[in-house]
Image: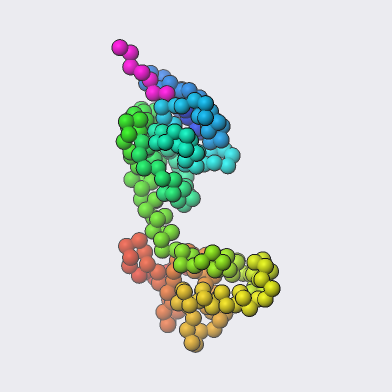
Amino acid sequence: MKKRKIQIILIEDNLKLNKALSKGLVDSGEIQMLNSFTNGEDAFAFCKKNKPDCILTDVQLEKKWNGIETIVEIRKIYPRLPVVIYSIQDDDKYFRDFRSSGILSHYAYVKKSNFLLPEMIIPLLKDSCNGRSFIDPEIESRVQEVIHKDESSPLSLLEPIEKKVAILLSKGFSNEQIANVLGYKDKRSVSRINGLLYAIWDLREDKMDEAVARTRAAIIVRENKLLNWEEDGKAYYKNLSGEWVEWIP
């Protein structure tokens, strides 16, 4: 009895790679290419009328949706539809999107440079179709790094309006300018929020000049690290291992 081929769609915005991958997978004799796309929106429209066995997608795509966002939308129609995601991108956003996507099973997420050849992709397609999951150790390491960064972010300690003030402060806005942007009639409202920032981030001491606290708050936002300054002027932060290490500008 002839073995059924795995029916997939490919989403890859590099036209040369799209064509080469499609050909290599089809030439293997194990894959049937239902269609290929350069963006997630068109792939989603196709999937509303056609259900593939599995989706193979790059993370960075044309148009608005990236590969992970595309899978989230398609899985609203077909829960746990098998997918293989590959990427060369190292932007925190993609790892953050994956973390929040809720993708738990029937997937593989690999680094493009490690799993690019058709003979390496096909086992991943088969495994995802069989309900197994795999994440490239390099990808997993970056996901964990982003989780740590988010959980230890100084902005995570702030309420929404405090975050807005902190971000504007870090861009060099004056209290009056911040008040105008946020629609406050009185810049003293911003001054009060600044005071909260300094207290929450432990920046305000009796002898500390307000300008110093403001500058350090701006540095904390830009570095996205909860820095702690010692009397000698050196600043320290907690690394991934939870150890206090010196911050080197």
- At 37% from the left edge and 37% from the top edge, which residue is drawn? 107
Residue positioned 37% across, 67% down in the render: 238
Q: Which SS does the magenta portion mostly show?
A: loop
Looking at the image, residue 4 lies above or below residue 146 = above
Foreground pick, 19 / 164: 164
Residue ranking furthest to the top: 1
Q: Is residue 77 located in the magenta-colored stretch of the structure?
A: no
Name the residue located 41 percent from the left edge and 27 percent from the top edge: 53
Query: Is residue 31 depicted above or below 66 in this figure?
Result: above
| Residue 74 appears in the picture as rendered | yes
Name the spot of residue 8 as percent of width and height, x first: 44, 26
Question: Residue 75: x percent and y percent?
Answer: 45, 37
Q: Is 198 situated above or below 31? A: below
Res. 145 image quadrant:
bottom left
Instruction: Work out whether residue 103 or residue 25 is closer to the camera in this orientation and state it.
Output: 103
Q: Quadrant of the N terminus?
A: top left
Question: Magenta includes 2?
Answer: yes
> Residue at the location (31% across, 36% down)?
132
Magenta stretch in the rendered image: 1-7
Tell me where residue 16 appears, x and y as whole percent: 52, 29
- Give x and y (percent) for residue 96: 45, 51
